[in-house]
Image (tube, rainbow, N blue to C red):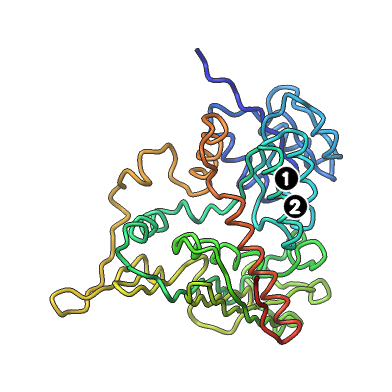
Amino acid sequence: MATKKVRVGIIGCGGIGNGKHMTNLAKIDEVEMVAFCDIIEERAVKSAEKFGVENAAVFTDYKELLKDKTIDVVHVCTPNRSHGFITVDALEAGKHVMCEKPMAKTYAQAKEMYDASVRTGKKLTIGYQQRWRGDSQYLKKVCADGELGNIYFAKAIALRRRAVPTWGVFLNEFEQGGGPLIDIGTHALDLTLWLMDNYEPKMVVGTKYKMLGDMTETANAWGDWDPKEFTVEDSAFGFIVMKNGATIILESSWALNIADTNEAVSLLAGDKAGADMLDGLRVNYVKNNRQVIEKPDFKTGGVAFFGGRKGGEPSELEARAWIDAVINDKDVPTKAHQALVVTQILEAIYESSKTGKPVYFD
């Protein structure tokens, strides 16, 4: 008997929707993309023509899409400001939801999403595909096996020198809630908390800067940005203390005068060993009274905990795990309560930067 197709509706047919979500859903045999919504109708039409089933529905109002009771899953691929209310409405309409990262613009909005998923019993996951990289999966197994011991210091790193996204609404604080911190810093923080399996923050101190946003000759990877549109920070940093005493330093930038860059990587230090992703994955420890650095080879295949799946790209692996969770009632790739803590910490960094004071959690 053929497996029932999972009927998916897409809300938001811009760059992330097309480039990540639809592209990877199209590779999954069990998926049918049956409805597409965007406030710009032409974008929804083009996505439907490229990725949709025959006669796929097109909407400019997401609430009309949600009225279709045959849709099982909704992917929310809109700017951060609308993640919250669209996701809550979709859950209340009986849909499982994959929402693109970050979970929401604010903690309050993210909490409403989480509460709605609990109340409705529908699955909710957030698009943190960096967990599905080969090095991430390997290091997660190392941490879970206790090889690092008690991880008490970490860095979550998302540093670009000159790579400010100049398209869409990335520079718009109203739509996005911030710049590199909420855009790429969110990936680094999610990855680090997940590796540590630590979701209990105690306090946060944060700073943010807009020091380069008014430049006109920018040497930017995607061309010069318009200073008049640049309403977010160009870098932000956080000092996070967890309830168990662990310390995490979060570094994020789109534009920063540094020579060495790294994006969505972690550094971990435990009482038995340490690891980092600064030059490939490196695990460091002491053996026979000698300092040792171990570098796994990711060019020669994989092992059971991240191999054996169709597709190798992190975003495709994430999409397959998500659809598998829906079909077979499994745990979702990124649990909503985990993403909720990420948003809570990011908001605290912004708040601390504004007030100049630490933010303490109950």
Q: Name the residue under label 2.
A: 112
The percent coordinates of residue 361 (x first, y second) are: 65, 72
Q: Quadrant of the C terminus?
A: bottom right
Q: Mark 1 points at which residue?
A: 116
The crowding category of the residue bearing disc 1, from other C-alpha atoms within 10 Å (few below 14, some 14 to 19, many at least 20), is many
Q: Nearer the viewer, residue 99 or 143?
A: 143
Name which residue lies at 50% across and 82% down: 259
Name which residue lies at 64% across and 44% down: 124
Name which residue lies at 70% across and 69% down: 347
State how many labels appear: 2
Would residue 152 be found to the left or right of residue 164 on screen?
A: left
The crowding category of the residue bearing disc 2, from other C-alpha atoms within 10 Å (few below 14, some 14 to 19, many at least 20), is some
Q: What element carries label 2?
A: helix
Q: What residue type is labelled 1?
A: Ala
Does 104 appear above or below 306? below
Specify the quadrant of the image occupied by residue 280: bottom left
Specify the quadrant of the image occupied by residue 295: bottom left
Q: Do the residues labelled 1 and 2 touch (CB within 8 Å)?
A: yes
Q: What residue type is labelled 2?
A: Glu
Would residue 20 be found to the left or right of residue 143 on screen?
A: right
